[in-house]
Image (cartoon, rainbow, N blue to C red):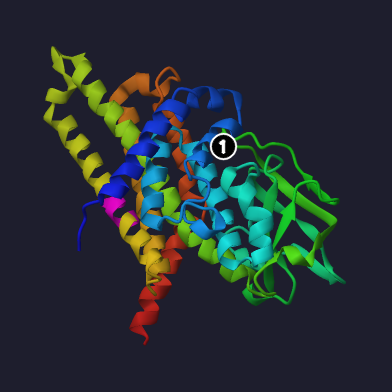
Amino acid sequence: MDFALTEEQRAIRDTAQEFARAEFLPHAARWDEECIFPVEALRKAAALGFAGIYVREASGGAGLGRLEATLVFEELAAACPSTAAYLSIHNMVAWMTDRFGSDAQRTKFLPKLVSMAHCASYCLTEPGSGSDAAALKTRARRDGADYVLDGTKAFISGGGASDVYAVMCRTGGDGPGGISCILVEKGTKGLAFGKKEKKLGWNSQPTTTVMFENCRVPAANRLGAEGEGFKIAMMGLDGGRINIGACSIGGARACLEAAQAHMGQRKQFGKALSEFQALQFRLADMATELDAARLMVQRAACALDRDDPEASTQCAMAKRLATDAGFDVVNEALQLHGGYGYIKEYSIERYLRDLRVHQILEGTNEIMRVIIARRLLSERNR
């Protein structure tokens, strides 16, 4: 058991940090304020391999592991959690295409995905099925060489801006076994988008409903076999959960560092805030919680890389802990800033708004507890 990063991993982390500070951080506040989807900045990230981090090299990706991905996403999110989180979703779709796609699908989709000439969205949630994802209603009816899709997806990151949509839809009966995954390309007749949602955070990426009405898609765009879509979706989410945990850690780390600096500069009652032991203790707890969360995220990443049978449970644990701890650390950092933390001249409030949704998406933290509890109780009943 070695907790030290390799020289290569440190180089990857440092490259991501340097890039994020140069290309994300100076613009993040404006992207948030003006709801700008920074496609050109994302393409610069793709040029470093960050759009296909764990897509195989043979398919044009970086061929790295999940641990390396957590290092990248932590650094990117330290600059802009919203943009980093969209890149995580894009990576999820690129990996699903590489892992479950045919040679023809990889050839068709992956070159533009790993370069971000095309952006990708993941479409699972529906107006009537959020946490109960297996109850989805969007249907894909087979018609000769095509599927015809009808239904609606909700809260889709990249909706209207992305070029490829990985759509979980019902090709069979009720339950998870009736779900398939189909790639739908922008411009397909019958594909439409709702209004851009006005959100608390994540403003550097558009969020819309995605609607299908008699939307005809080639059957050749189905990933895997019919009925494998739910498995594909859940395997994608395992990676998404540790990535979003890493994004929470990155955003929270930035706020912890800001709080450290502020405590050294701000004086009250004739001395710096950093001299008050009560505030020192709060800072110590923030750092400890963050480090514990990072270790759990990295352990889950390693478990996923080696196909550990406990990987899904560890990903759920890591996501639950990291996103809760991350938000709590940002909230504490805001409190330590006092009124300054509440105004937009300082960045703390942006991180707070961006990190809040991490406790909801990629499976709510309540669902993470369900996954963990089911595993614990299944062991007990064995």
Q: Classify the position of the C terminus by image quarter.
A: bottom left
Nearer to me, 353 or 110: 110
Give the answer, above or below, for where 257 lies relative to 58.
above
- Which amino acid type is shown beneath numbered disc 1? Arg
Determine whether, in the image, residue 314 is placed left or right of residue 159: left
Q: Is residue 12 left or right of residue 117?
A: left
Instruction: Please give left or right for residue 242 compared with residue 51 in the image.
Output: left
Q: Is residue 117 above or below residue 216?
A: above
At 12% from the left and 30% from the top, the residue drawn is: 277
Q: Which residue is at the front of the view, 269 or 311?
A: 311
Q: State whether the magenta stretch is mostly helix, strand or loop.
A: helix
Q: Nearer the viewer, residue 85 or 342?
A: 85
- Of 250 and 264, the residue lying toward us: 250
Q: Is residue 323 at least partly visible in the picture?
A: no
Residue 294 magenta-drawn? Answer: yes
The structure residue drawn at horizontal position 58% and vertical position 31%, both measured from the top left corner, is 40
Q: Secondary structure at mark 1?
A: helix
The residue depicted at 51 percent of the width and 54 percent of the height is 362
Which residue is located at x 65 percent, y 71 percent? 224
Query: Residue 246 placed where, x, y %?
Result: 39, 47
Locate residue 170, reporting x and y percent: 73, 69
Q: Quadrant of residue 179?
A: bottom right
Left or right of residue 42, residue 263 in this image: left
205 is within the stretch colored magenta? no
Image quadrant where one finds the N terminus: bottom left
- Which percent across, then down, holds residue 244? 45, 49
Q: Which residue is mark 1?
A: 43
Quarter of the image where one finds residue 348 = top left
Give, as a single range, the part of the protein colored magenta: 292-297
